[in-house]
Image (spheres, rainbow, N blue to C red):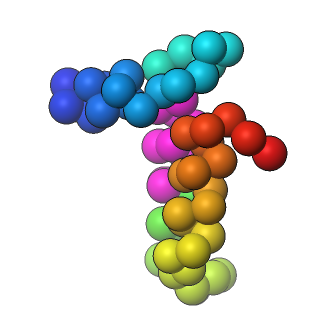
Amino acid sequence: MQKVKALITNLNSSTTLSDQDLFIQIWSFIQGYALLIKNKITRYDAQLVEYTLDQLLKGKD
């Protein structure tokens, strides 16, 4: 867990979002998306994952 927190701190370039909040957003996306895939509601889309994580890390809409 310490390595994940260190990674988030290194990646967090937002001045308005705390490291903890960014961690929760990323973790929630991963868990939610994994659940959708597991329940066969959607298929894994690498481009969607890349885009979503990019937006979370850059803080852009």
Q: Residue furthest right?
A: 61
List x then y, in percent, for residue 36.
59, 71
Q: Is residue 16 above or below residue 38?
A: above
Residue 25 coordinates in the image, percent (x, y): 57, 37
Give the x, y percent position of residue 29.
56, 51
Residue at image x 61%, y 70%? 48
Compared across the picture, whether 12 is left or right of 7 comes to right
> Residue at image x 55%, y 52%?
53
Left/right placement of residue 9 relative to residue 29 reads left
Residue 8: quarter of image? top left
Q: Is 23 within the magenta? A: yes
Q: Which residues are magenta?
A: 22-31
- Is residue 9 covered in magenta? no
Count the numbered circles shown.
0
Q: Quadrant of the N terminus?
A: top left
Q: Image quadrant for the C terminus?
A: top right
Residue 29 visible at all: no
Magenta region, mostly helix, strand or loop?
Answer: helix
Q: Which residue corresponds to the image point at 37% horizontal and 22% vertical from the top-left?
A: 9
Left or right placement of residue 52 versus residue 44 in this view: right
39 versus 35 height, above or below: below
Q: Is residue 12 above or below residue 61?
A: above
- In this rendering, is residue 41 above or below 2? below
Q: Work out whether residue 17 or residue 35 is closer to the camera in this orientation and state it.
A: 17
Q: Is residue 17 at all visible to an observer of this figure?
A: yes
